[in-house]
Amino acid sequence: MDSRASYFYFAFHKAATTAGYLGLLLLTWRLIDGKAMWQVSAGSTFLSAAWLILTRLKMYHLLQTYFDVFSRLEIVVPMGLGVVLSVVALMTPSGRELHATAVLEIIIWGLLFGIFWRNKSRYEKRGYGPVPKGTWISPPASVFKPGDLILTSGNVARRLRESVGHAAAVVQDPGGALFAISSHMDRGCTLEPIEDVLQETRHGYYIVLELAHQIPDSELPKMYELAMEMVKENRDWSSARNVTWHKFVVALPVPQSWKDFLLKVYRCTGYDWLGMLFGRLPPHRWTCIGAALELYHRMGIKTNPYGTGLLGFGTSLLDPIMPVRFLADPAFRLLTKDDIPASLAPFVFE
């Protein structure tokens, strides 16, 4: 399947499942609200079955992306709701057929919960969320390769209840030194020595994803040049925005103290603040993972579709590009303890 066909399949699948979720939520609410045009027992049985079918269809994918909090919620919430609906149907006076169906639903929900619980054993909690067992935590910079994606813990991970919340992509300069491109809330897009990036994680940890297909040596200078171009684009854009903002504030018919306050409280850093809510990749400004993804795309590296939005067709609505989701991207491979060289094994204690 080519990339265009793959994108449309992904978009259609996401749109269909989102529509299914919204429709079931509406029907469930109408039943609870007493406005559904069917008997309580029959309606509860039907809705539990519908939630069961939709959850089962997505179960394999959701188990593969267990480390994403939204994937866990997409299993746990329908599961809890479905069991409640089946119990309601079972306790409501009705025919034996509906009661038997409700019992069967509860049994199947129990089986799905068992699968979900067994899948949980494949992961271990790290920080505020799970990572696959055997993950190599905080490998040394000596094993990094150009194109690697570093995912780190920190305040964003804590707020999202995820294992990682910040990202940086590794690039190599013509002299062989490693740098990392990212975007920060206070600085915008940056290209920093790898040692500085790792120093920022000294109170936490990081994990590393390497590209499934390594970048040829002949392409490494191009990658570094693209990273430099991105940093310059971001700085030029933020500088122009700050000039425009300064002119606007100066022209306001308000006291100078107010102008000083406005200039103090707002300064464009080049960070894409809206990108924290919307999975977009606008020109010249990015979130941390957005900067890494933009660089990969400029290099022609294909990744999973991101930021397609609730309905799947490029709306980006409430669909932020979260770093943890890259653990399920086939374009990357997670570094595990099996990748630890024999020379480093005595120094790895996890």
Image (cartoon, rainbow, N blue to C red):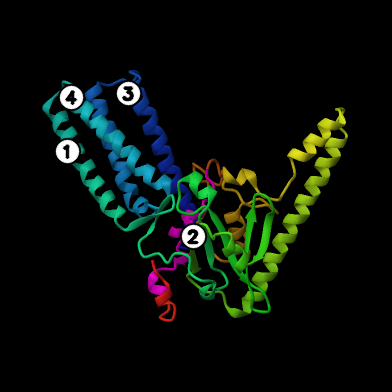
Q: Earlier in the sequence, mark 1 or mark 3?
A: 3
Instruction: Answer yes or no: is residue 94 visible.
Output: yes
User: On the picture, is 339 further left or further right than 255?
Assistant: left
**Quarter of the rendering containing residue 228:** bottom right
Identify the mark at residue 91; answer none if there is no mark. 4
Residue lying at 42% horizontally and 45% vertically, measured from the top left:
70
Amino acid on which disc 2 is placed: Tyr
For badge 3, the amino acid type reads Leu
What SS does tag 1 mark?
A: helix
- Which amino acid type is marked by label 1? Leu
Mark 1 or mark 4, which has the lower sequence index? 4
Is residue 146 found left or right of 139 in the rendered image? right
Quadrant where the C terminus is found in the figure = bottom left
Look at mark 3 in the image and give the residue it sits on. 31
Gap between marks 2 and 4 measured at Cα: 50 Å
Mark 2 and mark 3 lie on one chain; the one further toward the N terminus is 3
| Tally of marks | 4
Mark earlier in primary sequence (2, 4): 4
Percent coordinates x, y for residue 250 in the rendering: 87, 36
Question: What's the residue type where badge 4 is placed?
Answer: Met
The residue lying at 52 percent from left, 45 percent from top is: 319
- Is disc 2 surrounded by few (<14), some (14 to 19) or many (20+) residues within 10 Å? some
**31 or 228: which is nearer to us?**
228
Label 2 sits on residue: 205
Q: Which mark is residue 104?
A: 1
Magenta residues (range): 319-339
Foreground label between 3 and 4: 4
Q: Element under label 4? A: helix
Q: Is residue 307 visible?
A: no
